[in-house]
Image: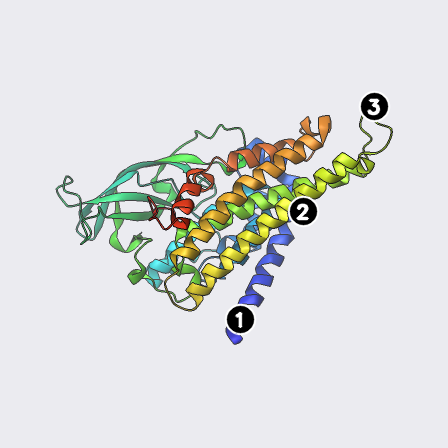
Amino acid sequence: MNNVIEIESASEDALARAESVVGLLREAAPRIEANNGLTEDVVAAMHGARLFRTLLPTALGGDALDLRSHGEVIETVAKGDASAAWCLSQGVGCSMSAAFLPLAVAQRLFGPTNAVLAWGAGVQGKAVAVDGGYRVTGKWAFASGSRHATLLGGHSWVFEADGVTPRLHPDGRKMDRTALFSRQNAAIHDVWDVIGLRGTGSDTFEVVDLFVPEEQTVDRADQSALNDSSPIYRISTSLVYAVGFAGLQLGIARSVLDALRELAMAKTPRGMPSPLRENMVFQTQLAQMEARLRSARAYLYSSADQAYADAANNVAISMDNRIAIRLAATHTINEGAAVTTDAYRAAGATAIFPSQPFERRLRDALTASQQVQGRMDHYQTAGRWLLDLEPDSTMFL
């Protein structure tokens, strides 16, 4: 019972802290986009609200939130600005690696109140084993939040000292590890020129022959290296990201639907005899969009609760529950983008102006739906399991 009370208290506190920055984020959203990265006042406010510490171990001053609460925090922040929410979802997902480090190392890297870890997509580096660690060379793209990060992480294939022979797991799989190092040790390439989520500053970074001590590398899939008993760390990083980025789409769609309702209360479309709110077609459209969004939200968080219950009971998360999160998150990401698109169209010509709360959010929602967590082939993965077939890949489970 005490554990339940503690979890609920941590969740309520984290959500209140997220709510505290929404107003600033709404005001700062145009500046964030123009800056191609989070502005200094926004980063300072997010640190002040301890938002980048929501998935850090409690031993490091973090919240180690449950999975639903994590999604709800990202959803809340996305109501203010999607780029800030994206950076937060990415950053706190990365910070889970602290639970796989020796405590003293984790305190050194993540102890500072401004600590943020960013990493790129996929295993793109090469880590050659040397005495005490690795010589790491690699180039990683899509490093969201790297402009305000203090730490970077490079996912790398491990090679023996000859630099040629891959190091293998006992089952024959190639071994990879994520090397953590100071942002100052990397060359940052400013390449982020995109249609939406422009404020994430998802640049590319590179290191060449950088020595990284063994103790500053992690295998995120190796549960035997886990140094924290909080349930969230027994859930794969991929599924935590899935819930976070689905929560982001919920937040975008909610803010757009709220803006659409507000518009309908005052707008009379050209050539129409009555306000938009009295139009029967619009009334039906709004109700349907509301139902779709609420349904997706309920599906996502009920699936998150089921998987978290496995982790909290210290049992392996069942494939049924892993598939459920994958399916719910993929559906929510795509349905959220669709609701945002439909709301944009329902707003009429008003929606095309950057001064209105529709245009940027549409671009952000569509961009977010293009990320790997929203890929349509995840439906095939779920479909195979529903038909008693093994998934083609468990990479995102």
Q: Residue at x 17, y 43 (%)?
A: 166
Secondary element at image label 3: loop
Q: Local crowd at mark 3 within 10 Å, few (<14), some, or many (≥20)?
A: few
Place of residue 158 in the rendered image (x, y in percent of width and height, measured from the top left): 22, 45
Answer whether residue 256 is visible to the viewer in this image: yes
Q: Earlier in the sequence, mark 3 or mark 1?
A: 1
Which circle's residue, 1 or 2, is located before the other in the chain?
1
Q: Secondary structure at mark 2?
A: helix
Query: Which of the labelled discs sits on residue 381, or is there none?
Result: none
Residue 59 position, x and y percent, is 43, 66
Secondary structure beneath dot 1 equals helix
Residue 4 circle label = 1
Taking depth in this image into account, of 76 and 190 the one nearest to the observer is 76
Name the kind of residue labelled 2 in the image.
Gly
Lower sequence index among marks 3 and 2: 2
The image shows residue 138, relative to residue 386, as above or below, that is: above
Corner quadrant of residue 27: top right
| 13 left or right of 235 in image | right
Residue behind mark 2: 23
Residue in the image at 23% along x and 48% along y? 175
| Number of on-image labels | 3
Residue 39 appearing in the image:
no
Query: What x and y, as percent, mark residue 312?
Result: 44, 67
Please determine whether, in this image, residue 86 is positioned above or below residue 36: below
Q: Which image quarter: residue 307?
A: bottom left
Q: Type of residue at label 1?
A: Val
Q: Residues within 10 Å of mark 1 (few under 14, many from 20)?
A: few
